[in-house]
Image: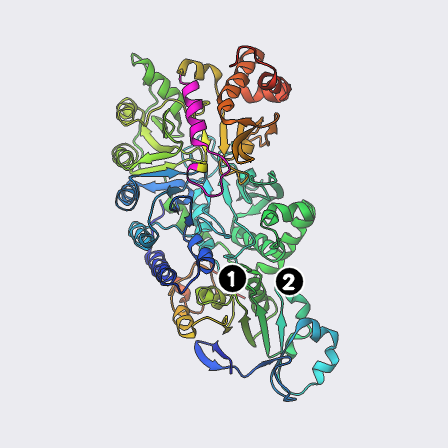
Amino acid sequence: MYRYDELDQAFVEQRVAEFRDQTRRHLAGELSEEEFRPLRLRNGLYLQRHAPMLRIAVPYGLLSARQLRKLADITRRYDRGYGHFTTRQNLQLNWPRLADVPDILAELASVQMHAIQTSGNCVRNVTADHLAGVAPDELDDPRPYCEIIRQWATLHPEFTYLPRKFKIAVSGSPEDRAATEVHDVGLQLRRDPSGELGFAVRVGGGLGRAPMIGQLIREFLPLPELLAYLEAILRVYNRHGRRDNLNKARIKVLVKTLGAARFREQVEAEWRIGRSHAPRLTAEDVARFRACFAPPPYAALEDQHVTAGREARFVAWDRYNTRAHRVPGYRAVFVSLKAHGSNPGDITAAQMEVVAALAERLSFGLVRTTHNQNLMLADVPQSELYGLWRELDAHGLAMPNIGTLTDIIACPGLDFCSLANAGTLDVVREIQQRFDDLDYLYDLGDIEIKMSGCMNGCGHHHVGHIGILGVDKHGQEWYQLTLGGSANGFTALGEVIGPSLPKHEVAPAIERIVEAYRALRADGERFIDTIRRLGVAPFTDSVYAPHPAAA
Amino acid sequence: MRHILRRREIVTDDWCYAGETAVPDAPLIVPLAELRADAARWRQRPGRLGVLLAPEDPVEELADELPRLALVAVQFPNVGDGRGYSQGRLLRERLGFTGELRAVGAGVRQDRVYLLARCGFDTLELAAAEDPDAALRAWSRYSVGYQPGDPQVPLARQRFLAPPA
């Protein structure tokens, strides 16, 4: 992984000192909340329903065991002994004290971490495929480029007060596991016919209000031009993005207003003129960053059958919670944060320490956070899988449901967030309870449920196979269901199936939807494919037709 | 008497905005719209001339006037409006402006000094309530930065250099 040099270390320490001073001024009454707000947001600090919320950056989802232990330590000393991993691979603390935040940031700096630009109208944490570097289908590891972008974007003097937040994702595989098409900028690694490396560039994707799929504005951007081109995009956006209406300030609105072709012309013109002053990536730069992500010293192993003679629970876990690895004899392993009865993405300090120890023993000391709010040990020898499963299982981290209906993505919702209209966590619980039979879950196959507690869409409900959006209806929590969304490879926005439902009807409605699927599916057909084939109408009928048996 | 921060020093402002002075050759800052409405008159005025840009003003259109201007003041009307940062960089890098580049408005606070200085602003007309000494200290808060072109950071410690001109 990338390790800080003295420049990086000096920078984060100076950043902590600056925020300590800003917090002091705020607490002394010298900085009003209005003045303090943009400053604290750029250090990851929100003021939430019950307490501040601190969002700690996990750049492109990569953590060392030491960093994860430090996070555990921080949650114990400054919070309530747990944290929450988000869809953008970061970690949120729900109960820090404002006056402690400078100390927390200093603790983070001591292990080469920070909370810089995890909120506010600036370039946010750059995200990547959780299988980066190990996926068999990968063209090139996206993480060196993510790190380059992270550094370049950190306190960029021109682009730290943008019209609105700005999210960049990078994928190195044909299968897009980083949801690049629903980011403000989505970069997909490509090679041109001469073998030169570069990126396909999409702009203007995004969820939240008025969800949009990113427009391809450049088929191939040569690697050395990466930062110059990003500067051109951001400059056009910074100058011309709307600032009069928060709901129309994302770059997707500018792209839509101008049209992709005109937006592209402006960016290309800006790039051609501006590149003489923009940073150019040299071969040395690229080599230096690539070296930081060189493959670990894998042993020469062979693929093996690990499930022969093992119990069914392990067999299921191996099938659902592990993924193919490009190196023979290894598997990438999901650490499930989706145990039934838990909040998606939540993890206790003790569990963090267990995962850190396992990473050190079995996976070169590295842990990944995933877009789906799980963790991953990416480099586990197959011979160690059974022992690993037993330990994960003993700590509630082996729920064999990755990719199934109960591997739900959800934002924290009304229980924590001051923006939310409706609760998410109790709905998750009801779904988990209703679908607690694993054989039934496995029969249903791949189904992604994504839930957001409000229009801002932090739970990515638009791109869930089943999307659930919490809405406020006369002070009551109601839920709107969408079907057919998808964010990997074939990006599509879900279609609303009908009027919103009260909370207690959400889980039963989902059961009726999947029952309809079971009745309608062709042999071996996945849920999403049945929806694509038939449209949402039959599912709408299943939810809204009178149900004489229902109480 | 207005105090400003110019190249890391707190000094008395020697410039006036239109309407602030009756002295015929006092250094004067006029809004872009006024400048363009009667360019010939302003060209003949004795004394140094500066222009005040609103956030939405396209700096490129200033190219013809720029050689005659000793100062460009860029407005930061609130702390969230970041358009002035682009205007500053473009004035310095694209239009080659070497005169005084001044940030002015309610958004010019000590917590933005680092960003402003790195976008080419050499003079800060701080928001009314801001403490100039604190702003001066903030100018030296960071010894490092990731983007090229910061005079505070030695070249050897900069990353992702711009190609040589």
User: Please, what secondary structure does the residue beneath circle 2 have?
Assistant: loop
Give yes or no for residue A422 being in the magenta stretch.
yes
Residue A310 coordinates in the image, percent (x, y): 29, 14
Q: Compare residues A416 and A22 and report the one nearer the observer.
A: A416
Image-quadrant location for residue B56: bottom right
Q: Compare residues A261 and A159 and report the one nearer the observer.
A: A159
Label 1, on which residue? B79
Residue A285 coordinates in the image, percent (x, y): 43, 53
Q: Residue B133, relative to residue A164: is it above or below?
A: below
Q: Compare residues A70 and A302 and report the one nearer the observer.
A: A70
Which of marks 2 and 1 precedes in the sequence? 2
Label 2, on which residue? B56
How far apart marks 1 and 2 lie (CA) works out to: 15 Å
Part of the protein shown in magenta: A415-436
Label 1 neighbour load within 10 Å: few <14, some 14-19, many 20+: some
Q: Compare residues B57 and A327 and report the one nearer the observer.
A: B57
- Could you tell whether B110 is left or right of A211 in the image? left
Q: Amino acid at mark 2?
A: Glu
